[in-house]
Amino acid sequence: MRKKFMAVILSAALAIGCIGCGSDSSSSLSSSASESKKESTSASSSVDSSSAESSSSAESSSTDDPEIQQVDENDAVQALISNTTGTVTLRVWASESDQEFTQKRLDAFKEKYNQVTFDIELGSCSEADAKDNVLQDVTAAPDVYTFADDQLIELVKGKALQEVQVTYTYNVNEANLPGAVSAASYDGKLYAYPMTADNGYFMYYDSTVFTKDDVKSLDSMIAAAKKADKKIAMNLNSGWYLYSFFKGAGLEAKLGDDGKANVCNWNTGVGPAVAQAIIDYCKDGTFISVDDQTLSTGVIEGKYAAAVSGTWNSAAFKDAMGQGYAACKLPTFTADGKEYQMGSFGGCKLIGVNPYSDYIGWSMLLAEFLTSEESQTLRFKERALGPSNAKAFQSPEVQANEAIVAVTEQSEFATPQIIGSNFWTPSETLGKIFGSGNPDGTDVQTLLDNAVEGITAAAE
């Protein structure tokens, strides 16, 4: 009972603005409501009298496996409604392609909570550009905005994301796929609400050429493709895809703890054996490296019976392969006589709440609404975007989509794309050499040492 009471007090604090404003959200909740522009000041005395206790509770929840405080929806929402006077004015950013869908959900939100008058302005900003635009001036940024998960750390460090300590209608950690929760978290704390979980890559294949057993292993896929005189395509010219082999063998390439330079150990341990395996696969001539455009065109024209790509090609590949269309997680590969499951970069689209919002509580409730099971199910039906919500993912409609199922299965072996800019050029150079079969015969250790040196160079 005490835990429930404290969570209600915390939600009331959110309503009147005692949390947020760019500060550490686990700090004291005793800020005077009279100093804020938030929903109301009517609950300030009750929040102030409980501030030290609430602060302690908030701090205790910020562990490596944080326990988010969730209360009965009626209690929590009623706390918001009761402490709200006047019009709640919110600004929301969504991508250009998501404008129509988001507007319909905003209208549904206003209808659901029609005891309150809302003025919600919807603006357009791509998820890829969100970080740069928000960090120009966090205090002037929208209350609620969508962004790609690889921007989360910089947004957290820029004090542009409100930590998710309280939930009103569902538990974010429990409701979403583990990979999506990981992508929305930093340093053991949850900072965003997963919206989709379909940004990654997997294997498309023609089931008239490959059996389900064939696609478990790259070696068996190559054998089957040879029999059918077909090719298997992958873009090794991009570090985004090349990463899959090294990650699969347990090696790392990621942004260091300082948030500036990368950490990469591809030149150690099994790294040289992985590099030689990639070269040997490409020398064989059945597994080939091509750029994304050539890969897509080749599948559509029937040149490639299998290809590594993402959900964005699902419609075109399904039309091209017809009855043979199928998709699955990436296969295993063999290096130095040992079999490894290929890894990958995976990504999500997230919704964040600006800690400088004048309406923190309502912004958090809106973020929940836009990422709820209902919203994610509708988003898939209307926009074919893969849900991060576990129940939405299990719906018959989603399970019938081979590409969405495949990228989600691969997510078990994927990591968020948190990597510095110095990764891309050296990994691209390395991938091109591998894809062409290392024509100069350069020692693989030398190739890896040179690539790692560039990848881990200090950021300018």
Image (tube, grey):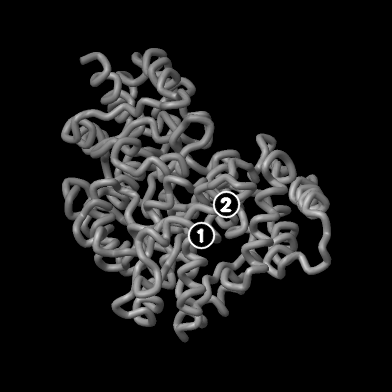
- Residue at image mark 1: 218
Q: Secondary structure at mark 2?
A: strand
Q: Please tell me whether residue 90 is drawn above or below residue 190 in the rendered image.
A: below
> Image quadrant of residue 327?
bottom left
> Label 2: how many residues lie within 10 Å, few (<14), some (14-19) or many (20+)?
many
**Viewer-nearest residue: 36 or 14:** 14
**Viewer-nearest residue: 124 or 228:** 228
Q: Which residue is rendered at x = 48% and y = 30% of the image? A: 188
Q: Which residue is outermost to the bottom? A: 301
> Image quadrant of residue 9?
top left
- Which part of the image, by quadrant, shows the N terminus? top left
Disc 2 and disc 1: Cα gap in Å? 8 Å
Q: Secondary structure at mark 1?
A: helix
Q: Is residue 431 visible?
A: yes
Q: Which residue is rendered at x = 32% and y = 54% of the image? A: 387
Point out which mark residue 334 bears: 2
> Label 1: how many residues lie within 10 Å, few (<14), some (14-19) or many (20+)?
many
> Image quadrant of residue 285?
bottom right
On screen, residue 411 versus residue 100, left or right, reads right
Amino acid type of the residue tagged 2 in the rendering: Thr
Amino acid type of the residue tagged 1 in the rendering: Leu
Q: Is residue 140 visible?
A: no
Q: Are marks 2 and 1 in contact (CB under 8 Å)?
A: yes
Q: Which residue is rendered at x = 63% and y = 42% of the image? A: 251
Point out which mark residue 149 bears: none
